[in-house]
Image (spheres, grey):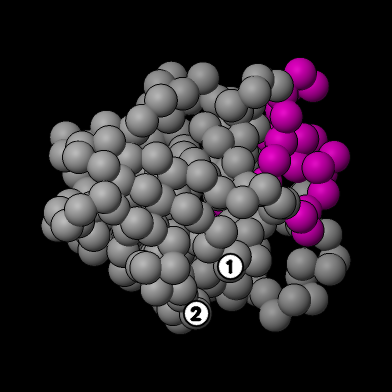
Amino acid sequence: MNFTEAMSARHTVRKYKDTPLSKEVVEQLQARIDANNEKLGTAISLVTDTEEGIPGIVKLLMTKNVKNYFVLAGPETPDMEEKLGYASADLMLYAQTIGLNTWWIGGTFSRNGVRKAAGAADENKVIGIVVVGYGENQGRPHKSKKAEEISSYEGEAPDWFKAGVEAVLLAPTAVNRQAYTIAGKGSQVTMTCKKGAFSDADLGIGKYHFEIGAGKDAFDWKK
């Protein structure tokens, strides 16, 4: 499975099999985390085989065997939440390509518990976690907006722009808001996300998906 296929296959999964991640899988995930941390300056880590940081309310929300997760953390910089969203999208799709499932959690987790489990440095901000494991099912597609509701292009939109927008509509967002505005002109693209809870992280996730769908060489982000 490649990343384009993973975008269509990935859905939120809340119930997991009681199957531990093998040493090989943990090493694969850790290598991907390390690559993101080095590239983006994030401080993401992987916690395995523990419910530390997962409060009772999450365990009651139709969940099962939530024991492994990425901790989305990084230094307090103005663009860190967007970078963490971008990295989390990469990690979720990568996990999907190696047979795993994921669930992005922003509000219902214990920051103190997560910090303790991950050994997160006090100077790093934790914005959320991404549960990872072997799902009991593959989840289901979420209700999605139409491309014309979130995008516009000056002139006739090229295929790469259309593919990028469709990829964004497959991305996970906070409470499924899909509050994006994507505009294109020539090879220049701008993307914004309506302000709200996790909007900066959502923007990072959306940008990552757009790049996968459109192809990074097909366009430039307008500064």
Q: Residue 33's image quarter?
A: top left
Name the residue located 39 percent from the left edge and 40 percent from the top edge.
190
**Residue 212 appears left or right of 209:** left
Which residue lies under the disc numbered 2? 143
**Residue 123 appears left or right of 161:** right
Within-10-Å neighbours for mark 2: few <14, some 14–19, many 20+: few
Query: Residue 158, position in %: x, y?
Result: 15, 54
Label 1 with label 2: CB-CB less than 8 Å: yes
Which of the two residues, 83 or 104, is positioned nearer the viewer here? 83
52 relative to 75, above or below: below
Within-10-Å neighbours for mark 1: few <14, some 14–19, many 20+: some
Where disc 2 sits, the SS reads loop
Q: Which residues are magenta?
A: 107-133
Residue 166 part of the magenta-drawn span: no
Which of the two residues, 223 or 113, is positioned nearer the viewer here? 223
C-alpha span from label 1 to label 2: 8 Å
**Residue 204 appears left or right of 118:** left
User: How many callouts does the rendering have?
Assistant: 2
